[in-house]
Image (cartoon, grey):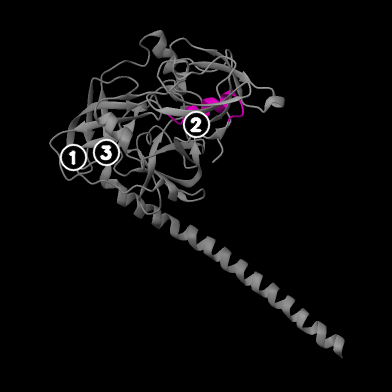
Amino acid sequence: MKMQRTFAPIRLTGAVTVVFFAASSLRADETVRQGYRLAPKAFRAAVARVEPSLVTIETFGGVGPSSGRAQRGAMSGINRPGEGPTTGLIVSSDGYIITSTFNFIRKPAIVTVVLADGTRKVAELLGRDETRKLCLLKIEGVSNLPVCEYVPRENLRVGHWAVTVGVGYGDDNPAVSAGIVSATHRVSRRAVQTDANISPANYGGPLVDVEGRVIGICVPLTPGSQEVGSGVEWYDSGIGFAVPLAGYEKYLERMKQGDVIEPGKMGVTGKPADAKTGGGVVIDKVMPKSPAEKAGVKSGDRVVKADGDEVLDMPHLITIVGRYVAGEEISLELKRGDETVNLKVKLEAGLDQGAPGEPAPKAPEPD
């Protein structure tokens, strides 16, 4: 009898556990099904919240797609900008509008903006951010324009719903594609990745969450390349990028002044260090009068850390440097023989960086 009294509760507990997990699984499945049923309604509501801040951008004149050998190379095939209107987003109530530089590859002579209420305004192109493929427009004679709320960068999570919105091609309703946030720190931490389809109609338009808050601006980016038209190869592939607007204010202020924000370079070439010495990158050559030389970097120095991160190889160092733009400083920890040297290098534009013949970094950065 003792045996029965001992094991009966165990059998009962096991049965209750099975029932509990079965019920939990059923509830989870129902929650997923309910989420899918409610998603379209949530997406429509999100688009409705952001739609008043969307603008249609029209461009006229400029360089043709086949004008000159360089232009033909840069804008041939899939890299050529799409025909027709494109998208922008109002970022201040007094008429500043952000969009993608992809929409201005042809350097149009005239730019007009159509607001949500149908008002058409001539726009001036002010500044550009070549590192993120963004540019800033300004229209005059307006006030109290609607501005969207931004998702704080620290609140972005992988798996959150994400919706792309575009108003190009003269459609009455925005073009919408839904997906999720696939990664939060891509392309030297400059961009959020999404699997929502992004096409030229979306470039310059927002990626929003289900509350209609702006995650970022959709742009064609690709790791390791700043070339005109690069990044369009991801067109509608399920690999898309958006530049977060939260925390971007300092660059907006620079673009308001007409600045062109360019990639920052140190002016060095390097090669992988022997793993026996501790890894990192050995500086092979320091360009004369380069930021690296001015900061005190010497040939033979071994870079072990950059921006506080351990350096794996030269492509990794380039990726870390890519977090900064020309004019900003990056911290380096070097090994010079037995000595540890800590330096700050103020980056500059227009310098070569990397080992001769070394391919552009392809691997995505860890979150």
Which residue is tagged 1? 94
Furthest residue to the left? 141
The quadrant in which residue 217 appears is top left
Q: Residue 218: where, in percent of width, then height?
A: 40, 36
Relative placement, left or right, of 93 versus 30 is left
Residue 185 appears in the figure: yes
Q: Quadrant of residue 358?
A: top right
What residue is drawn where x is 48% and y is 23%? 225
Q: Are marks 3 and 1 in contact (CB under 8 Å)?
A: no
Q: Amino acid at mark 1?
A: Asp
Other-residue count near label 3 (Cα within 10 Å), few / some / many at <14 / 14–19 / ≥20: many
In the picture of the structure, the residue carrying the numbered disc 2 is 234
Secondary structure beneath dot 2 equals helix
Could you tell me the amino acid type at mark 3?
A: Val
Q: Position of residue 117 (x, y in %)?
A: 20, 44
- Of tags 3 and 1, the one toward the viewer is 1
Q: Nearer the viewer, residue 180 or 295?
A: 295
Image quadrant in which the C terminus is located: top right
* Residue at the image point whose x is 19% and y is 33% from the top: 139
Residue placed under numbered mark 3 in the picture? 55
State which mark lies toward you, 1 or 2: 1
Task: Tell which circle, 1 or 2, labels the residue nearer the N-terminal end.
Answer: 1
Mark 3 to mark 2: distance in Å? 24 Å
Q: Is residue 71 magenta?
A: no
Indicate the secondary structure of the residue bearing disc 1: loop
